[in-house]
Image (cartoon, helix red, strand yellow):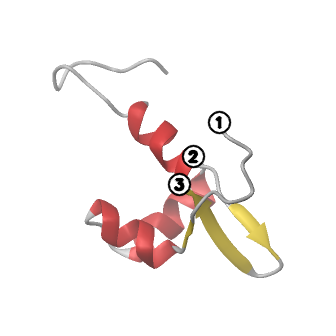
Amino acid sequence: MSDNPTTKLLTTRELASMLGLKPRTVDTWRVTGEGPPFVRIGRVVRYRQSDIETFLAGQLRRSTSDPGDG
């Protein structure tokens, strides 16, 4: 994970669009802890590109029965 201050920050809507999901799904992930880590600045929620990439790498599966690493 990079702590580079120039890391791109995405909104919930941008993340949802990138993944082909509804923003409400990303909101639900945030509440349940299922999605990528997020940054909260006051009332603003953003997702770091580096955290999204790490999250997606953890979702890789070889088959439908593959439980993944975690």
Up-down relation of residue 54 to residue 32 (above or below): above
Tell me which residue sits at (66%, 72%) in the image: 45
Q: Residue 1 carries which label?
A: 1
Tell me which residue sits at (51%, 64%) in the image: 28
Residue bearing the label numbered 2:
51
As helix, strand or loop, the secondary structure at mark 2 comes to helix
The outermost residue toward the bottom is 43
Label located before the other in sequence (1 or 3) = 1
Q: Which mark is residue 53?
A: none
Q: Is residue 11 left or right of residue 39?
A: left
Where is residue 59? Give x, y as percent. Answer: 36, 34
Residue type for callout 2: Asp
Tag 2–tag 3 contact (CB < 8 Å) = yes
Where is residue 49? Give x, y as percent. Answer: 53, 54
Marks 1/3: CA–CA distance: 10 Å
Label located before the other in sequence (2 or 1) = 1
Where is residue 57? Give x, y as percent. Answer: 40, 33
Tag 2–tag 1 contact (CB < 8 Å) = yes
Q: Residue 49 carries which label?
A: 3
